[in-house]
Amino acid sequence: MSGVNAVLSIARTALLTQQMAIEVTSHNVANVNTPGYSRQQLVMEPNNSTTVRLGQIGTGVQGQAIIQYHDKFMTAKVNQKVSTMTGFEAKKSSMKVVETLFNETTEEGLGKLLGQFWAAWHDLGNNPAGKAERATLVGRAGLLVDHFQSLYSDLMRLSTDMDINLGAGIEDINSLTGQIADLNVQIIAADKGVGAANDLRDKRDHLVRQLAELMDINYFEIGSGAYTIMSNSGHILVETDRSWDLELSSGQVYWISSTGAKVEMSSGAVQGGKLGGWLAVKQEVIPDVLDKVNNLAESFIREVNSQHSQGMGLAPFTSAVTGSYGVATGATHPIAGLPYGSEVQAGSLKIWLYDAVGTATEVSVTNAGWITLEDAVADINTGLGALGTASIYTEGGKGYLRITPAAGYSIGFSDDTTNILMALGINTFFDGYDSGSIALNSVITNNTDNIAAGTIDSTTVGSLGDYSLGDNENALALADLQIQNVDIGGQSATFDDYYNALVGEIGITARGYNSGYDFSRNMVNQLSQLRDSVSGVSLDEEMTKLIQYQQAYSAAARLIQASDEMMQTLLSAK
Amino acid sequence: MRITMNNIYGSIISNLDKLADDMRTLNETISSGRKYTTLSDDPVSLISALEIRSIINETKQYERNVTYGILWTDSAEIALRQTDEILSRAREIAVQMANATQSAATRASAAIEVGHLIEQAVALGNSQVAGEYIFSGQKTNIVPFTYELVAGTVTYNGDENDIDIRVGRNNSATINKNGKDAFMDDNETSNLFTYLIDLKKALEGNDVSGIQDSLGNLSDAADYINEKIADVGAKHNKLDMKKYIYAELQLSNTERLSDIEDTDLAEAILNLKTKEVAYQAALTAASKVMQLSLVDFMR
C-alpha cells in the first residue's frame, strides 16, 4: 500500500513511537534520584517494509523493547563490597564504645586509678599510723573498685545492645527475604507477557542491596527471572516464591529449615554485613576484652589480699574474725570451692593471741593436706586450745571460716605460707574475684585501722608477737606489687604492663576496623561510580534526547500536515 | 566514562565529607592540645605515652617519699646538733667547775643548769615529726626517752627497728636512727644521759674528781654524737641527691611525653589552613559544576 495514506500511516507510527520515547525519557528524569534505578531506553526499529515494483519501501517505525542499562556483574560486586563495608561499620561503631571505656588519653582510666592506689600505699608507708592516709587509701581503692565494676557492667550492656541489634537485624532480614520472594513471583508473571519487568527488577535489586548491608550473601538469577539467594555459608534464604527465616536465640543465629528445624549457623557463617559485625563484637571482641579485665581484677585481688593477709593493722582483732569467701554448704565445705581455693598449698601460718595486757602467744598451724574447711578448722582448733575456737559460720547457704578468740583475747596473723587466709578472705583488703564482683572487704571499710600496714615480729627473740604503729613493712610490700611481675591470666607481667597491653590492643583493633571501613567504603564508592556510570541517569543526556525526540515528533507532525495538504490538493482538483 | 547525576553529586558529597572530616580532626588536635584523642588514633604512640606516664607518676611518688625522708633526717640532724651543743655547754660547765677556786654554792647552781641541760637533751631525744617520735624506732607513738628526776635515770622505751621508705624501684632508704643507737651508744648504763646525770650529781656533791671524770666522758659522748650527726647527714645527702635526680627525670620525661602526645601547633594550624583552602576550592568547583545544566539553555 503506498500513496498519501501510507505517508499518513508512517507519520502516525513516528508520532506514537517518539511520544513513547519521550515517555521513557521523562520516566528517567523523574527517577534521577531514585536509589537503585537503572536508566531505560526505548529501542526503535523500522516497521516491516512492503515490497513494491522498485524494491522494498518502509512503513515507518515501531518500538522494539524498553531496555534497562544494567550491569549485573558490577551490581553483584557492589553488593559484595557493601557487606564488607557495613560489617566494618558495625564493628567500628561498637569498638568506639569500648575505646571510650578504656580511654587513657584523658588520664581518667583504670591505669591512672591503679597508679593512685599504689601511691596511696606509699603514702601510708610514709606514715603508717596516719588516719588521713588510711582514709585516702580506702577512697582510692573505692574508686578503683567502682571503675572495675563499671567496666564490667558497661561491657555487659554493650553485649546486650548487640543482642538487641541482632534481633532487629534478623527481623529486617526476614522481612527483606519475604519481599524478594514476592517480587520474584511478580517478575516471573510480568516477564511472561511483555518482556523485562525493569522497574520490578530495580526494586528487587535495591532490596538485595539492603539485604547485603545486613549480611553477606550469594545470589544468582535463574531462567524464569527469579533470584536464588544463599547465605555465605550456603544456607538458602530465597528460592523463587519461597523464603527461609533466620532466628536469634541466646546470642546465636539459627536458620529455620522447611521442616521448621533450627539449624545453628556456626560462628563465621555470617561474616559480613551488620549482622556479621555485631556477631563478631558479641562473640569475639567483648568476651576477649572482658576476659582480660577479669584476669586483671582476679590477679589484682589475689596479690593484694595475699600480701595484706601477712600484715597487721594498728591493733589485733578483738572479736571473731570471719572470712569473706564462702563455700556452698554440703556434707563438707571443700576448699576447692573457694574462688581462690586452688591457691591453698602446704605450709604453715602463725596465729597470735594477745591477752588483756598485750602478752602474745604464738600458735603455729600447719597445712598437711587440707581438703575441706573442716580439716582446717580441726587443725586450727588443736593449735588454739583454750585460747580460741575456729568454726564454720553458715549464711545464705554458704559456709565461712570463723576464728573466735577466747574472752579477753585478741587475735592477729602472720607468716602465712599456705595462702589459706587469702583464700578464706581473712585479714584481706578486697572481696570478690573478678571485675564484676570486686569490692572492698567490709572489715576494712568498717574500720580503717584494720588496714595492715605493719607486720607482727615473728623472728626477733625477746620481742616475738610485737607490733608497732610505725611499722610500714607490709605497706611497702604492697606498694612494691606495682613493679612486680605477677601471674595474670597465665602470663607473667606487672599490672601496668598487662593493662597497657590491653589498652594498646583495643586501640590497634579499633584502628584496624576504622581502616577496614575506610578501605571498603572507598571500594564501594568506586564500584558504585562505575555502576552509576552505566545505570545512572544523566539529566543533560536526557534533555538532549528529549529535544531529539521532540524534534522528531514535530517532524512527524509536519508529515501529517504534508499528507493532509497532499489530500487537499487531490480533493480540490477540478 | 559516562558521567551521571549520581556520579557528579556523589563525588561532590564524598569529597566534601572527607575534607570536613580532616578539618574536624585537625580542629580537635588543636583545641585539645593532643595529637590523638581516642585510642585508635595512634595506638603505638599511646602505649609509649602510657609507659612514660606511669614512669612519671612513679617518679613523682618516689620524690614524695624522698621529701618525707628528708623531713625525718633533717629533724634528726637538727636534734643531734643541738644535743652536741648541750654537751659543749656541759663540758664548759665541767671545765669551769673543776677549777679549785669554785665554791660549793656555785657548783650547786651549776648543777641546776646541768639539770636543765638534761631535760633539754631528753626533749631533743623526744623530737617529733608530724606527731611521730623520730627516735623511738618503729614505736613512733611511744615517747622514746623518759627522765626519772628522783631516781636520776633516763630510760629508752622505743625499739631498735629501722623505718625504711622506698626511694626507687627495689631501692629503700632508712630514714630513722633509733634513740638507743643515736643517744645511748647502745649502752643504757653509760651514755650521754648518764654522763650528764653523773656531772649533775658530782656538782651537787661538790665532787671535783667526779667533775673531772665526767669531763672526759662528755668529750667521748660529743665525739659519738658527732659521728651520728655525720651518719644522719650522709643519709640526708643521699636523699637530697635522689630528689635532685627525680626532679630532673620528671622534667625530661614530661618533655618526652609532650613530644609524643602534644600537638605541634604550628604544624597543625598550617595543615588546617591548607585544608581550609582545599575545602573552599572544592566548594567553588562544586557550585560551578552544579550550575551547569542543559535545562538552563532550553527555551
Image (spheres, helix red, strand yellow):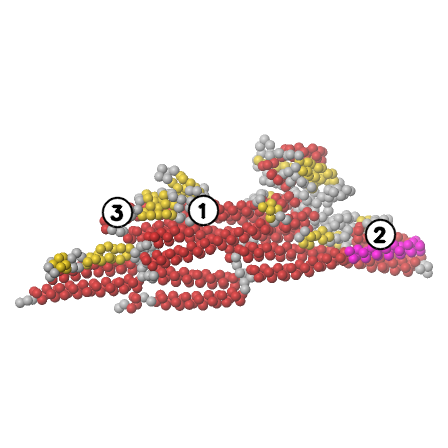
Q: Which residue is mark 1?
A: A279
Q: Provide the chain ID for the residue under circle 1.
A: A
A381 sits to left or right of A11: right
- The residue that mark 3 highlights is A189
* Amino acid tagged 2: Asn
Q: Secondary structure at mark 3?
A: helix
Magenta stretch: helix, strand or loop mostly: helix
Q: Position of residue B258 (x, y in %)?
A: 58, 61
Q: Amino acid at mark 3?
A: Ala
Residue A20 horizontal/vertical position (percent): 22, 58
Hey, which quadrant is residue B236 in on the image? bottom right
User: In the rendered image, which residue does mark 2 sit on?
Assistant: B191
* Badge 3: chain ID: A
Residue type at the position of mark 1: Leu
**Residue A312 makes an appearance in the image:** yes
The reply, left or right, for residue A34 in relation to residue B94 is left
Label 3 vs label 1: CA separation? 38 Å
Q: Where are the magenta residues, as a range? A: B204-231
Q: Nearer the viewer, residue B231 or A407?
A: B231
| Local SS, label 2 | loop
